[in-house]
Amino acid sequence: MPETDLDLLVTAARRAGDIAKQYFQQNPDVKDKPDGAGPVTAADLAVNAMLEGFLQAGRPDYGWLSEETEDNAARLQTARQFIVDPIDGTRAFIDGNKDWAHSLAIVENGAPIAAAVFLPMREMMFAAAIGQGATLNNKPAKVSRAALDGAIILGAKPNFDGRFWKDGQLPPIKRAFRSSLAYRLCLVAQGQFDGMITFRPSWEWDIAAGALIAQEAGATITDQHGAPLRFNNAHPQVPGVLTAGPELHAALSARLEPLRSSP
């Protein structure tokens, strides 16, 4: 069994990739979850079952929160928690797009302390431990130092609507999109894109791992109101996410309407 929490997550993420690749582009069995919660495939469930068994065998005293496991309030009484999305970007997975990821984090006192985000079809392993920096395939990852003008920001189209920005005007930024929230955060950490925004309440399993990786790569990451992200909440969501290098984060924050609702 791997000795460190980070080693454990990286090993688990690679095992998840081995399973998911067996289903990818093989007409996966797709079902719709209740209450409009989105699709789930046989691959999501198979990966989740492996992760839950493997990770909790390695750290039986850690709590468990996963998109594909019914939540249990017992996690709120644990000192550390696994926060996991077996496949982040399930719609991309169904469509045969490679931009899906396994997102695994360990949280302590509301903050991620170890994280791995793995894109098996792109052979990209993002990893971070608190205070130790972030890596992509074992090489250091660093955010860009872009200023506001011309910055390329990852986000879904509704977030660029004028109603979220002062005077109804989008700043001089460019928009890009990737399906997986975890991957978006990691692309900011890598410096391939300059920032990432979402003004919708975001599930913790989509955000926790990528948040630490971006932070350790030098990004400033907050909720849409400028407050630090906190995880292992009773209702496992955070109120939106804004991530970028410190200068760009400050510039974007200054251009946002202080009272804005989620798209």
Image: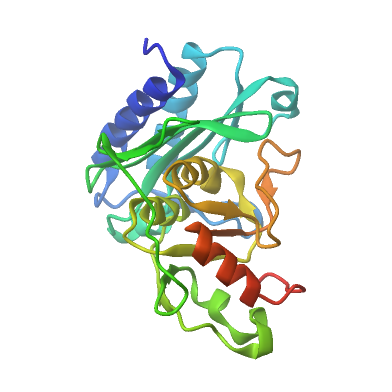
Query: How far across and how far down the image is residue 201, in percent?
Result: 66, 58
Look at the image and tell me whether residue 181 can be seen: yes
The quarter of the picture where the C terminus appears is bottom right
At x 62%, y 77%, the residue is: 255
Tell how many labels.
Answer: 0
Question: Quadrant of the rendered structure where residue 38 is?
Answer: bottom right
Quarter assignment of residue 69: top right
Pick the residue in front: 188 or 13: 188
Q: Nearer the viewer, residue 182 or 167?
A: 167
Residue occupying image coordinates x 42% and y 24% = 6
Look at the picture and state if 96 lies above or below 17.
Answer: below
Question: Foreground residue, 168 or 141?
Answer: 141
> In the picture, which quadrant includes the N terminus?
top left
Q: How far from the left and from the top, in percent, is residue 220?
A: 54, 53
Residue at 65% x, 79% y is 164
Residue 83, quarter of picture: top right
Query: Does residue 32 appear anywhere in the picture?
Result: no
Does 131 sit above or below residue 90?
A: above
46 lies left or right of 27: right
Colour mapping? rainbow
**In the picture shown, does residue 179 fall above or below 169?**
above
x, y (%) of residue 259?
A: 77, 74
Q: Nearer the viewer, residue 165 or 202?
A: 165
State the image coordinates of residue 25 (x, y, percent, origin top left): 24, 52
Residue at horizontal 52%, vertical 46%? Answer: 211
